[in-house]
Image (cartoon, rainbow, N blue to C red):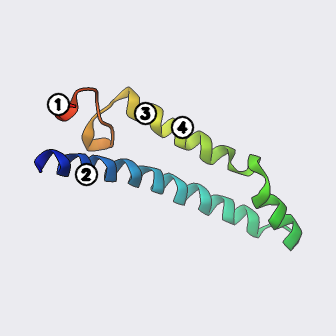
């Protein structure tokens, strides 16, 4: 039970990191969208895959940081952690 609780906590911390990045980046994108001149421009903005390039890069950088310093307390499960 203790190991499952530790695993659950590590996963929560990991996913909370993803959520924080998404919240920040999507807030910035929303501010950009609010400056667009028309509804069609807003639709086109959100439909454009390139709109999400910073979000994608920030999520990848988060994983890179975790892999560079993999510890459960920051949301990463090192090899062999908990005997798995």
Query: Does residue 18 appear left or right of residue 41 in this picture?
Result: left
Q: Are marks 3 and 4 in contact (CB under 8 Å)?
A: no
For marks 3 and 1, the one nearer the N-term is 3
Quickly name the residue at label 4. Answer: 60
Q: Nearer the viewer, residue 45 or 82?
A: 82
Task: Say whether marks 2 and 1 touch (CB < 8 Å).
Answer: no
**Viewer-side label of 2, 1:** 1
Q: Nearer the viewer, residue 56 or 7?
A: 7
Which residue is at a point 50% across and 52% down the rendered structure image?
A: 21
Dot 1 or dot 4: first in sequence order is: 4
Vertical arrangement, residue 39 with respect to residue 27, above or below: below
The local crowd at label 1, few if under 14, some if 14 to 19, many if 20 or more residues have their Cα within 10 Å, is few
Q: Are marks 3 and 1 in contact (CB under 8 Å)?
A: no
Label 4: element kind:
helix
Q: Residues within 10 Å of mark 3 (few under 14, many from 20)?
A: few
The alpha-carbon separation of the residues under discs 1 and 4 comes to 27 Å
Q: Residue at left 46%, top 56%?
A: 20
Q: Contact, CB < 8 Å: mark 1 with mark 4?
A: no
Tag shown at residue 63: none
Q: Position of residue 66 (x, y in %)?
A: 39, 35
Name the residue carrying label 2: 9
Image x and y of residue 19, in percent: 47, 56
Q: Which residue bears the numbered disc 3?
A: 65
Could you tell me how far apart the alpha carbons at marks 3 and 4 are, in whole angstroms?
Answer: 9 Å
Q: Is residue 38 above or below residue 76?
A: below
Which class describes the residues within 10 Å of circle 2: few (<14), some (14-19), or many (20+)?
A: some
Determine contact: label 2, label 4, CB under 8 Å: no
């Amino acid at each position: 039970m203790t190991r499952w609780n530790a695993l659950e906590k590590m996963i929560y911390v990991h996913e909370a990191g993803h959520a924080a990045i998404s919240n920040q980046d999507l807030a910035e994108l929303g501010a950009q969208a609010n400056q667009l001149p028309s509804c069609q421009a807003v639709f086109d903005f959100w439909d454009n895959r390139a709109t999400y390039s910073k979000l994608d890069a920030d999520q990848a950088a988060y994983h890179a940081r975790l892999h560079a310093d993999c510890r459960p307390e920051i949301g990463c499960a090192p090899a062999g952690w908990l005997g798995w």
